[in-house]
Structures are given as C-alpha cells and as structure tokens.
Amino acid sequence: MVSWKPVNVPKTTGDRLSLALRGGSVSGGIEHRAWVEINLSAIAHNVKQIKTVLSPQTALMAVVKADAYGHGAISVAQATCEAGAKGLAVATIPEGIELREAGIDQPILVLGAAHTPEEVKAIAHWNLQATLCTPQQALLFSQTLNTCNQTLSVHLNIDTGMSRLGTAWQQATEFVQLVQRLPNLTLVGIYSHFATADSPDQTVMRQQHQRFQQVIDNIKTLEHWDFSQPSQRPCLHISNSAAALTDQALHYDLVRVGLAVYGLYPAPHLQSTVQLQPAMQVKARVTQVKTLDADTGVSYGYRYVTEKPTKIAVVGIGYADGVPRNLSNKMQVLIRGQFVPQIGAVTMDQLMLDVSSIPDLQVGEIVTLLGQDGKYSISADDWADTLGTISWEILCGFKHRLPRII
Ligand SMILES: *Cc1c(COP(=O)(O)O)cnc(C)c1O
C-alpha cells in the first residue's frame, strides 16, 4: 500500500530538515524535488484540544482513512492513540490491515461496506470491527463467520438523512433485532453520519439527531440492554469533526474525528471553538531559474504570456504530486517569506513561478506551497476556496507520490 519510503531523519541533528533536504546521509544522496512535512506534535496537540470539548464519558476515535487524509496512516494512528484517541476508523479493509501489520492494537472500525465472504474473513482475521449497513450483509457476515467458527464485533450504520450507507432509520429497530438474533455477531456499536454538520444552519443536523435519538429510544425498550450501563449496551456515535465542535449533546459515547485532527476547521464559524494547528506542509525546490523575453508564452497552452522581461523559476512539483491543475495561474507560493505568483499551466511534475521580485533566487531554494514561511502561511482552505472545493480533498491529494518527512 505504501508506495513511498519514509525518510528517516536522525533526531540528534540540529537542523533536521535542512539535513534531510540536502540528501547526504539522510536519503542516500537523493535530493527530494518536493516533499510533505508532517508535524506529529501538531496532531497530538489537536487531539488534546478536541478532547477539551468532550465530556469524560465520550471517547475520541481518530479517522485515518485515505492514508490519514494524506498524512500517513501508521504514524498518525500512533500519534493520535498516544495523545488519547481510543480507537481508529478507516474506510477500507486494506487500510485496516496496514495498521494491524504495523502493530497497532487499538480497535479499528472499517466504515465501508463488505460484501464477500473473503472480505468478512479478512475483517475477522485482522481483528477489525465491521460496519453492517443492511440485513443482507448481516446474514452474509453471520453465515460466513459461522463456517469458520469465529465471532466479530460489528457496528450498525443507520441512515438518518445522509442518504449514503446504512439502513433507513425507520427500519432500524428490526435491523437491530435481526443482528441481535444472528449467531457469531457481537453488536458493539450503532452509528449514523451527518450530511450538513459544517453548515451554520443546523436544521438538517438537528433533524438527523432527532431521528437517531428516536432509534435509540426505540431500541432501549428491547429487553437485552441496560442503557444506564454503557458497558452493557452498544456504543452510540454520530458526530464528525464539525458536530464534535458544535454541541456536546451530539457526542454520545464517541466522536469520529478526521479533519480537525489534521488541524483544519470544517467551517469558518467553528474557528472559535478550539485552537487547531495544521499538521501538513508541502514544499518543493527551485530546479531552474531563467529570464524570459517580453511576450513569451509559459507552459502548456500558453495560458500565461509575459508582458515584460520576466525572471521565472521552475519548481519540481506538479499535479501528479497533489497540486491541483485548476490552480494554474491562480495560486501563490512562499519563497524567503514572501508571496510569489505561480504562472502558466501546472504540469504533471513541475510548475513555474514569476520570481522577478527575487532577482538573486538560486536553484535549490525551498518553495512553500502549503504551510508557513516567516510571517505568512498558505492553508489548504486557501486552495479549497480558490477551487470551490473543500480542504478534505486538498489534503487527500497528497497521499500518493511525495516522500513524507515526519
Ligand atoms: C470521513 C468520516 C468521518 C470523519 O469526518 P471529518 O469531517 O473529517 O471529521 C466520520 N465518520 C464517517 C462515517 C466518515 O466517513
């Protein structure tokens, strides 16, 4: 799964980063043209900050799907659990296996749906917790586990209005009763997911919450559970980052927090809640500097043409690394603590900058695409705003190609 090799930077070095970037002993002489820096202290800080708004009975589950939103699932899983997370959530079975293979022994919930006996066996073999979305799935799980004489901890996903996975809230009671009857399944959780928790208008979220509460009130009357004893009943959860930062009444037994762990706010109106630190920075190097005449086209399609003689820098990062091509001509980067405009189409592996404001710029100098350089910083929210998308998508764009420096 992991296509990059983490760079092992010796802890004793004074300036770890500059050593790492120069290659040398750190990366076997290969100079990285671009890289992602992950600050695990920021991740730990964010977990502790989020915990300040949780009541002591509410656990924090760190959502580390999509390689921890591009931050590296294994190291983020370790850092969040050390900082007090009580479980992990992934989207797919291979994501869960990756964590188990790395020796992580926390509960791991697979949020996605499994449909084949092979998937069921893999979930059981790796001691993952499964999400059951439909009665058919529950039957498949129970039968498959029966043949191999294993039991599995399962969470039921109830659709209260997201219209994604899950059994409709109106049928939730029957679903719960079915799963209780089926052998080889241990019902450890019942959950739902909000569609609009990041909106300042809480109407839909409150309606979903009411439906979830209705489901709970209905199943409370089933004889099997003592709801006053959290250990005697399934764990209840519905909140993502936005809901976790909005209201304790939405927290129940645990909150499933993704984005906020990585230091970004789900929405501007939630910025006053806790103090988060972005954990990811994206940097690259200048690989060539040149001066173009006036009226010279730059990059594919000549989407930028110089008006005057222009000093440009070529930078070794492109859309295959995670810089969205739609940012072409619309983004700025930081060099020596100052903003510099990007020009022309972003290409697969490289992009160009107008560096006329830095006449003595040298090949090898560091360009900050996301993160802080001196007084200024550029965040995934800035890119998302320009593109009309969300910061989640920007972060996930960095999960594949670039080396990570932890
Ligand atoms: C991705 C996901 C989360 C985390 O959402 P954030 O907004 O990043 O906190 C929680 N629950 C489910 C079911 C998810 O798919």
Image (cartoon, rainbow, N blue to C red):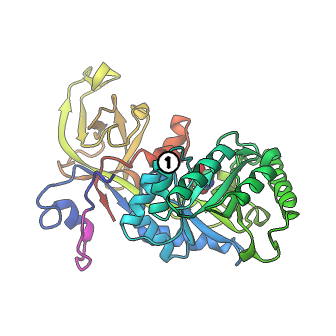
Q: Is residue 271 above or below residue 55?
A: above
Q: Vertical placement of 19 versus 296: above or below?
A: below
Main secondary structure of the magenta stretch: loop
The verdict on residue 156 being magenta is no
Can residue 373 be seen in the rendering of this structure?
no
In the figure, residue 345 lies in which quadrant?
A: top left
Return the x and y of residue 56 as percentages of the image width and height.
Answer: 70, 78
Is residue 389 in sight in this rendering?
A: yes
Per the image, the residue denoted by label 1 is 117
Q: Nearer the viewer, residue 128 or 316?
A: 128
Instruction: Say left or right for 39 vs 124.
Output: left
Which residues are drawn in magenta?
A: 7-17
- Asked if the magenta segment contains residue 10, the reply would be yes
Quadrant in which the C terminus appears: bottom left
Left or right position of 138 against 319 = right
Asked whether, in this view, residue 372 is left or right of residue 393, the answer is left
Looking at the rendered structure, the kind of residue marked 1 is Pro
Q: Residue at x 63, y 73 (%)?
A: 51
Residue labelled 1 has its Cβ within 8 Å of some atom of ligand 1: no
Q: Quadrant of residue 24?
A: bottom left
- Residue at position x 41%, y 37% in the image: 324
Q: Position of residue 42 (x, y in %)?
A: 47, 68
Relative depth, front residue between 222 and 161: 222
Residue 79 quadrant: bottom left
Is 65 on the left-hand or right-hand side of 325?
right
Q: Which x, y percent locates residue 257? A: 59, 60
Image coordinates for residue 237, horizontal then vertical, percent: 70, 61
Residue sitting at 24 percent across and 36 percent down? Answer: 312
Query: Tag count in the figure?
Result: 1
Determine whether 225 is above or below 158 in the image.
Answer: below
Look at the numbered disc 1 and give the secondary structure of its residue: helix
